[in-house]
Amino acid sequence: MVQTTDFQNIPFSLKDLKNAIPKEYFKASLAKSLFYYFFDFGLIALFTFAIYTSIQYGYYYFLFLLVPLQGSMFWSLFVVGHDCGHSSFSKGDKINYIFGLIAHSFLLVPYFSWKKSHQKHHLFHGNLEKDESHVALTKKSYRALRYIMKQQTKRRIFQRLYKLCLFFPIYLFYNDHPNHNGKAISHFEFNDVYFRQNEKTKFYISIVGYFVWLFALAASLYFSFWLVLFAYIVPWILYNMALHFVTYLHHSHEKNPWFYSENWTYLKGALCTTDYDYGVVSPVLNFFHHNIERYHVVHHLFPSIPHYNLKPATEAIVPILGDYYHLEKFSLNTYLRIFNNCKYVNEQNPKEQVYYFQST
């Protein structure tokens, strides 16, 4: 990855990259999408039955394997539902909406609201003023946030929850990033940040889907507390941990710069993401997690590519990207290193065209 202001003179265009990818990789296959969709739900059902059996017959030691596997499949299902949000699940908008609504409601995500905010993230990634999630803090915002965390109980609680990797559900209810100019945005309210007026019906249906499933879970706790705890609640927490862990690494790195609007372009922002090679476990993760960890750069460049075509699409453009393609081999200290090194961007020099993370 180039780490100079040469980001202002990228030697290829988005069109060059698109032309290098065979057209069939952009086409969604409903049959393939449905296979992965029901494969994920099928494994979730299978693990639920296995957890039920383990509890019923007292084989509690199996839970140490089954519960993490269930959480892993929750993350997998989110990735397929995420395809629905990008219209890469099917050509049909209604099919994308229905299957996305079911998958995301099951995971306690308001589908349409998240789809809209996620689209904004894709449209403006790398833009310090307009990006929606995993946005770099400026030095001023970072210092203010650090001070507030020391002063307010609410912020201390938020920090602890963040460390438990519950950032995503908090983000859904209460996103108070500085880009919102002091206003907290909730995915559960119809607002002019995410939605157009003609989208109210889809918004409300998604909210109803969320709370119907939440009510069903609450009712199930009464009839089978331990099954719901180990087959859903703990896996749901683990899935949120995986979601935060993976997406944080994709969008935060010492080598990936940030831009203000006057120097930002869609191509620059999309290139400022990172793919990760997880070594010997990569083939397993690529299959069960639908390529999302390993092939994320091309997804940001062309989010309409279905997950099962991300690998060949990446291979098609890597020769063109050259040093602008960022692939890192994951190690046990990767997350901690990035967390420690990527505190904020120092925006205090207005002559700079790109801003890299600072650690102190």
Image (cartoon, rainbow, N blue to C red):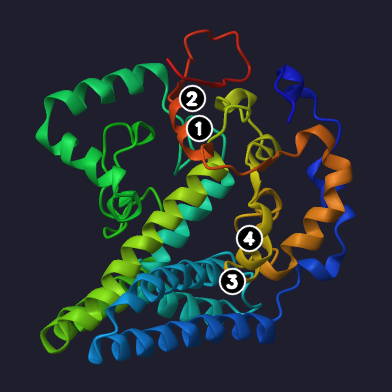
Q: Is residue 1 above or below residue 296?
A: above
Determine crowd level at label 2: few under 14, some 14-19, many 20+ residues with C-alpha closer than 10 A: some
Element type at marker 3?
helix
| Rendered image quadrant of residue 218 | bottom left
Q: Are marks 2 and 1 in contact (CB under 8 Å)?
A: yes
> Which residue is drawn at the image coordinates 42% and 22% (left, top)?
138
- Disc with the residue nearer the chain's start (2 vs 3): 3
Horizontal arrangement in the rendering, residue 127 relative to residue 116 (left or right) = right
Q: Amino acid at mark 2?
A: Asn
- Separation of residues labelled 3 and 1 (CA atoms): 26 Å
Horizontal arrangement in the rendering, residue 263 relative to residue 114 (left or right) = right
**According to the image, label 3 marks what residue?**
288
Quadrant assignment for the N terminus: top right
For residue 281, the mark is: 4
Determine crowd level at label 1: few under 14, some 14-19, many 20+ residues with C-alpha closer than 10 A: some
> Which residue is drawn at the image coordinates 64% and 78% (left, top)?
90
Q: Amino acid at mark 4?
A: Val
- Separation of residues labelled 2 and 3 (CA atoms): 31 Å
Q: Amino acid at mark 3?
A: Phe
**According to the image, label 2 marks what residue?**
341
